[in-house]
Amino acid sequence: MALIGWKLPSQIRPYTDYKKSDSAMGFASDKRRHPRVASQAQLEISHPAWGVIQLKAKDSSQGGFFALRGTHTLPPVNTEVKVLIKRHTGPLNDTPVSMRVAHISDQGMGLEFF
């Protein structure tokens, strides 16, 4: 993975304070492999057949990102995409990272590092 010094800021608190009742309300916190943190990253997602789309990350973890859909048509689950991760200070990676579309919802899609 070609991330340049990428770390989550220490002031961001992981989403680990869910109660047991949260699982019944649609939160899958008990199934998560990595804690989630809020993200303000912009994701430039590219695929030869789908072109390039710019999405805002909702959250991130060591396993990947959840990208908000916006008005875009998203690639199907299991599609391999290249992702450039950007912050207000510029790109975090100099070459796009290979990721897989892990799941899609009405809000957006989960992208998984591999």
Image (cartoon, rainbow, N blue to C red):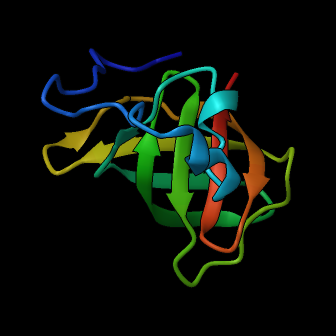
Identify the residue at image location x=46%, y=39%: 18
Quarter of the image where the C terminus is located: top right
Q: Identify the image quadrant of residue 80.
A: top right
- In the displayed structure, does residue 78 sit left or right of residue 109? right
Q: Residue at x 47, y 26 (%)?
A: 35
Residue 105 x %, y %: 72, 65
In the depicted structure, whether residue 82 falls above or below residue 25: above
Q: Position of residue 48 (x, y in %)?
A: 76, 55
Picture coordinates of residue 21 (x, y %)? 59, 47
Where is residue 51 drawn, in percent x and y?
67, 65
* Vertical position of residue 86 compared to residue 98: above or below: below
Q: Tell me what residue is drawn at x 64 percent, y 59 percent.
A: 25
Q: Is residue 72 above or below residue 10?
A: below
Q: Residue furthest bottom?
A: 71
> Count the marks: how many?
0
Considering only vertical position in the picture, is 53 above or below 87? below
Between 29 and 2, the one nearer to me in the picture: 29
Q: Is residue 97 left or right of residue 94?
A: right
- 21 with respect to 114 (left or right): left
